[in-house]
């Protein structure tokens, strides 16, 4: 099977862990073991999130030059290279001798008039206590969202991906037997100007939406969206929460899910299933193969009426 796998940024750098190189490498090594288990019997294409990492780079840049912050498209490219290198190295260590892997910086076109630019929803960077968040807003003018009581994160625009500009290069690498790591952080967001030229924009594309688009364009057999949560839950965070196992897009349509986290995952997975008639899975990184096989996590299958 050809499988597009998207690794969540919080799966690669877990909540509460220090944002250090040591912690990042440790988590990537765990991720590589799960990916290698999949890659033994399937051809995989790996995308990944970058929310914590791009937020860290933004803070570092702001500390150096508060009045001249680096744009988010450039920070996205930096994190795509950084995380891609770490995944490639650890994946090659985990795979048998002779395996081949390539990391590709990936520009993704978005619409300049996407409504997301007027309504930021994508969390990036560290979690702040309320008093810290107030100081950050005063210093940088960032929009913030409360992820949990008293815990806030910066939010930025998350426009929909329209076109993966290097998809032909990805296909060539796959045809050569390479495991491709691409579309990191949802890809580097660019728009086409009235003069036909591309330019970067201040946004972070949701990597799950880009992964779903990539899976469609590569005619993948399955899409796996892997995170630090075991499955999609009904009533998540409440005493009555319950994990959803095998399900369909129609059944998931009634859930009220967070716009900046599980919402895009479910929407992206359902879009892929409805468009392809194939399967998509959501769940914990360490359960990747079990999710694909329907033994763990949430496996989304076509609605019977559409088969």
Image: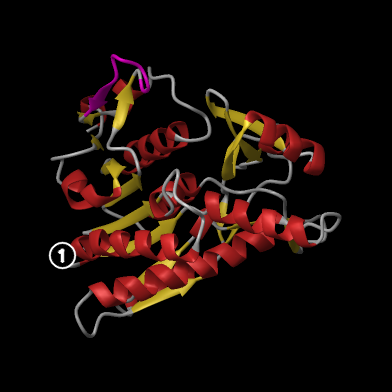
- Whether residue 109 is visible: no
Q: Quadrant of the C terminus?
A: top left
- Whether residue 107 is visible: yes
Q: Residue shown at 41%/38% (left/top)?
A: 265
Say which of 218 and 178 sits in front. 178
Residue 25 located left or right of residue 91: right
* Residue 79 painted magenta: no
Q: Work out which residue is located at the far right of the displayed protein and give it.
A: 67
Provide the residue designation for mark 1.
Answer: 41
Q: Residue shown at 64%/38% (left/top)?
A: 155
Q: Position of residue 66 (x, y in %)?
A: 82, 55
Residue 154 position by quadrant: top right
Q: Position of residue 46 (x, y in %)?
A: 37, 61
* Residue 237 painted magenta: yes
Q: Work out which residue is located at the far top of the displayed protein and give it.
A: 240
Q: Position of residue 233 (x, y in %)?
A: 31, 26
The number of discs equals 1
Residue 257 located left or right of residue 158: left
The colour scheme used here is: secondary structure
Q: Work out which residue is located at the far bottom of the displayed protein and give it.
A: 98
Residue 209 located left or right of residue 88: right
> SS class of the residue under badge 1?
loop
Q: Quadrant of the N terminus?
A: bottom left
Magenta stretch bounds: 236-244
Residue 273 position by quadrant: top left
């Amino acid at each position: 099977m050809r499988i597009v796998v998207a690794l969540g940024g919080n799966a690669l750098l877990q909540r509460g862990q220090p944002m250090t190189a040591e912690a990042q490498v440790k988590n990537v090594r765990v991720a590589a073991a799960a990916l290698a288990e999949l890659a033994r019997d399937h051809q995989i294409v790996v995308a990944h999130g970058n929310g914590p990492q791009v937020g860290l780079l933004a803070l570092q840049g702001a500390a150096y030059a508060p009045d001249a912050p680096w744009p988010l498209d450039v920070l996205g490219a930096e994190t795509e290279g950084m995380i891609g290198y770490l995944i490639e190295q650890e994946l090659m260590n985990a795979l048998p001798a002779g395996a081949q892997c390539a990391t590709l910086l990936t520009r993704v076109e978005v619409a300049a008039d996407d409504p997301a630019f007027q309504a930021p929803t994508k969390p990036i960077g560290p979690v702040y206590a309320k008093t810290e968040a107030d100081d950050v807003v005063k210093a940088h003018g960032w929009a913030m969202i409360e992820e949990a009581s008293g815990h806030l994160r910066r939010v930025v625009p998350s426009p929909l991906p329209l076109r993966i500009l290097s998809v032909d290069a990805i296909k060539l690498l796959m045809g050569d037997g390479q495991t491709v790591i691409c579309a990191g952080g949802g890809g580097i967001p660019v728009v086409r100007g009235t003069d036909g030229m591309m330019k970067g924009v201040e946004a972070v594309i949701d990597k799950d939406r880009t992964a779903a688009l990539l899976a469609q364009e590569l005619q993948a057999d399955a899409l796996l969206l892997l995170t630090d949560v075991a499955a999609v839950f009904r009533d998540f965070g409440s005493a009555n929460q319950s994990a959803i196992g095998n399900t369909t897009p129609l059944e998931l349509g009634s859930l009220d899910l967070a716009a900046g986290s599980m919402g895009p995952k479910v929407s992206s997975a359902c879009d892929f299933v409805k468009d392809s008639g194939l399967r998509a899975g959501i769940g914990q990184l360490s359960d990747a193969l079990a999710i694909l096989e329907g033994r763990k996590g949430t496996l989304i299958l076509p609605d019977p009426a559409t088969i």
